[in-house]
Image (spheres, grey):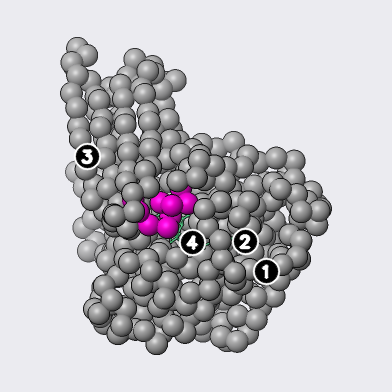
Amino acid sequence: MKQPSQIKPAKGKLGVLLPGFGAVATTFVAGVEAARKGIAKPIGSLTQLNTIRLGKRTDGRTPLIKDCVPLAGLDDLVFGAWDPIPDDGYASALKAGVLHKENHLDPIKGFLSGIKPMPAAFSTSYVKKLDGPNKKVGNKKQLAESLREDIRRFKKENNCDRVVMVWCGSTEIFLRPGPAHETLDSFEAAMAKDDPTIAPSMLYAYAAIMEGVAYANGAPNLSGDIPALEKLARDRGVPIGGKDFKTGQTFLKTVLAPAFKARMIGVSGWFSTNILGNRDGEVLDDPESFKTKEESKLGVLEHIFQPDMYPELYGDMYHKVRINYYPPRGDNKEGWDNIDIFGWMGYDMQIKVDFLCRDSILAAPIVLDLVLFMDLAQRAGMGGIQEWLSFYFKSPQTAPGLYPEHDLFIQHWKLKNTLRWMMGEELVTHLGVEYYD
Ligand SMILES: NC(=O)c1ccc[n+]([C@@H]2O[C@H](COP(=O)([O-])OP(=O)(O)OC[C@H]3O[C@@H](n4cnc5c(N)ncnc54)[C@H](O)[C@@H]3O)[C@@H](O)[C@H]2O)c1
């Protein structure tokens, strides 16, 4: 990837298209509107709140990220969505039960009701626990073409300069990359003959890339993470990234695990379990969708601990992840971790983590940052996989043959150094010997 010689300015409207208009998507759009109206603050968003150090520690240059790189402003965002369930933004947000009706939904009811999901490319073969009447018909090639038309129409009707798409749809059943996903030709031929290995989320990714729309995937299903679409994105200079927003349990896991590793503390077992009662929890109650999520959640420790390199510390670690659908909790997930660790001379210890979180409250700022950073990458001419946005994902998409970096602080450092690099600023190495000359 070449260092951008210039970044086009963020002028005009930025369209945000969301396949899936459930808890995460409605919490995200409601939060943006609330921030625009001064009703609530965009907490958790680096693009809105975080600063970035430029130059030496003694230079005193620490602007906000949004004052350092040319990002689209919140006022320039316009939203659209697809969902098989026809609820508008207000009805869907009420059902999701994340945000307070009187304080946060009613004051922006007109805005939320105005976002009505377009008919979705959806099939219950890929999400078994849900269905709805708001669906497109046709073979997969026709569905993809129809999504492309939706993108063009949305862009025109809303007078958008650019568009970004973030998959906020349900987790689909587990699929492995196969022959249909290898090349653009095999992918297009497979769409035309309704090949079952082409999931709906891949149609959205394909449609986005073909329309020059940056695409990020917030769920663990493959979607854009297949060779055919990765190459298409590179060839067309369209940024892509995924998979699976890193929000609750995995966010903490990728903070704690690097700490044990840094101190050469051993880990014999890590048991993670969750209860949640939202629609996502219901979808994940299906073993095939859970398998997709499980793979995504399990991968992180293997890569952080490198058991092949440290067999006496991590070689026999037992890692188990469970998600239990428990309706009374709604979106307020509880994630427990029991971590069995061992130290000096092999003496054992335990750590218990009980994270009473709110799933969509943690995910919404990630959607906002991905929208704004993906758009930045697009204007900077950075097509293909955006590995610098691994910070936001449980299963970061990487170049073929490269293992993903999961350590949250390395990811954070990489993100900020990429912003510095884009702006032609000096990279921060933290070496710091010059202060002692
Ligand atoms: N909230 C978090 O912390 C978090 C973290 C990581 C990943 N995720 C993932 O984000 C996604 C959204 O989560 P949520 O809590 O909003 O779930 P949700 O069930 O409330 O919303 C998902 C919506 O996607 C729709 N949908 C499914 N297939 C679709 C398709 N083909 N086209 C268009 N719409 C489709 C469903 O009808 C539903 O309304 C899930 O895949 C979830 O696993 C969430």
Chief SS of the magenta region: helix
Gap between marks 2 and 3 measured at Cα: 37 Å
Q: Position of residue 280 (x, y in %)?
A: 43, 55
Which residue corresponds to mark 1?
136
**Is any part of residue 313 visible from this angle?**
yes
Check disc 3 and report its element: helix, strand or loop.
Answer: strand
Q: Earlier in the sequence, mark 2 or mark 1?
A: 2
- Distance from the alpha carbon under mark 4 to that under mark 2: 13 Å
Instruction: Give the SS element for disc 1.
Output: loop
Amino acid type assigned to the residue bearing label 2 in the image: Phe
Residue underneath mark 2: 122
- Residue 2: tell me if it is visible: no
Q: Single out the mark in the foreground, 1 or 3.
A: 1
Q: Which residues are magenta?
A: 276-284
Q: Residues within 10 Å of mark 4 (few under 14, many from 20)?
A: many
Report the residue marked by disc 3. 353
Q: Residue at x 80, y 57 (%)?
A: 192
Residue 340 position (above or below residue 144):
above
Who's the residue at 75% across and 65% down the image? 138
Q: What residue lies at 37% left-to-right and 43% top-to-bottom? A: 324
Whole-percent x, y for residue 17 in the image: 54, 71
| Residue assigned mark 4 | 168
**Taking 74 as reference, is 292 left or right?**
right
Other-residue count near label 2 (Cα within 10 Å), few / some / many at <14 / 14–19 / ≥20: many
- Beta carbon of the mark 2 residue lies under 8 A of ligand 1: yes
Q: Earlier in the sequence, mark 1 or mark 3?
A: 1
First reached walking from the N terminus: tag 4 or tag 1:
1
98 and 220: which is toward the camera = 98
